[in-house]
Amino acid sequence: MAKQKITLAVTGLNNTDNPGPGVPVIRGVKDSEEFDVRVVGLVYENLEPGIYMEGLCDRIFQVPYPSAGSEELIERIEHIHQQEKIDVLIPNFDSELFSFMKYEKRLAEKGIRTFLPTLKQFQEREKDKLPEYGKKYGVKVPNGLNLGNLSQLNEIEKRFDYPIMVKGQFYDAYKSFNIEQATQAFHKIASKWGLPVIVQEFVSGTEVNVVALGDGNGNTVAAVPMRKQYITDKGKAWGGITIADEKMLELTRSLIQKTKWKGGMELELIKTNAGDYYLVEINPRIPAWVYLAVGAGQNIPEALIKLALGMEVKPMTDYKIGKMFVRYSYDMIVDLERFATISINKEI
């Protein structure tokens, strides 16, 4: 059977020590048995490694940061669409999702389909609202405190025992063992991601994650749990293994059913020695380790494209247990010409 030809635009090609999901999403899509995909890479920086990886993208375009204004970003996407006729767009950064959700209808009218959470779904799972989220949906969540200014740090010692986690509203998390470290983390995060800075009680246990896909009607299309095997100093999984854990899957299916989650998601959980699960974060998009799910038998990027195109998708329930992923660094030798082209022309 001939594969369906589509053009896919993808962001998040920064495959560094804090990797974006773009490269593994593209790898998953290229493994598809149903789609013949032309890939348009959308980059914010001219040194994102995905620009220089052979055979990854058919075309690369630089786009303005969402912080420069949603309108400017969307206009650039529309300009690219005139050349490339994008069928599906998969954004992969938390910080850009708001812009794409806001203009979802406008993009759809142009023929660019997305499959994103609703604004309500996106906002209620934000880190500073997680305690309320836990109460509403019956999930254990670490106690938290939102800091709007530095003087509130003094409240920490009344409310929490050290160590604590100090987190940014989009990214970054630092384990702090005393007020000095917490202050340092506060400054670092506030200057990068703004306020509030979130303080969370530290829950001791094993870090486990689930990558999942919801169809927007309460059904779980895909879900694969893994245990982190190796964690970088940025808290990113550099190695992980798929595990059999029905409780994690039940928790995931329950959340997707109750919230009617639409799109990709990652649940970050701590499994305590007592066997309790604490939800520490919900990432409202496909995570950077999604290729492990593909390797285990659930091609989530392919299923996401199908949902975006309005195709029928049967829920995937089986996956291979004991499949591992291990990341590695790899030096690519590239010509300065490619770097100069993206820097000057904003496209390759």
Image (cartoon, rainbow, N blue to C red):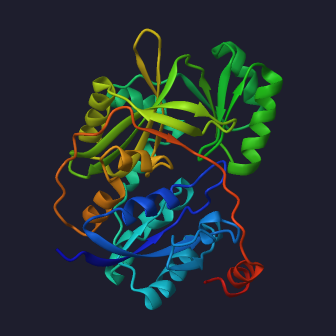
Tell me the residue at 73%/44% (across/down).
Answer: 190
Image x and y of residue 227, in percent: 46, 30
In the displayed structure, would residue 195 be above or below residue 33?
A: above
Query: In which quadrant of the rendered view does residue 182 lie?
Result: top right
In the displayed structure, would residue 308 be above or below residue 155?
A: below
Image x and y of residue 226, in percent: 42, 33
Query: In which quadrant of the rendered view does residue 64 lie?
Result: bottom right
| Residue 17 visible (yes or no) | yes
Nearer to the camera, 285 or 157: 285
Query: In which quadrant of the rendered view does residue 102 lie?
Result: bottom left
- The mark total stands at 0
Tell me the residue at 44%/85% (across/down).
Answer: 81
| Residue 284 visible (yes or no) | no
Image position of 182 (left or right of 227): right
Q: Name the image quarter holding the N terminus.
A: bottom left
Image x and y of residue 296, in percent: 34, 43
Tell me the residue at 62%/47% (across/down).
Answer: 328
Quick one: which residue is furthest to the top in this view? Answer: 274
Nearer to the camera, 243 or 136: 243
Image x and y of residue 29, in percent: 37, 64
In the displayed structure, would residue 328 be above or below residue 51?
A: above
Image position of 29 (left or right of 129): left
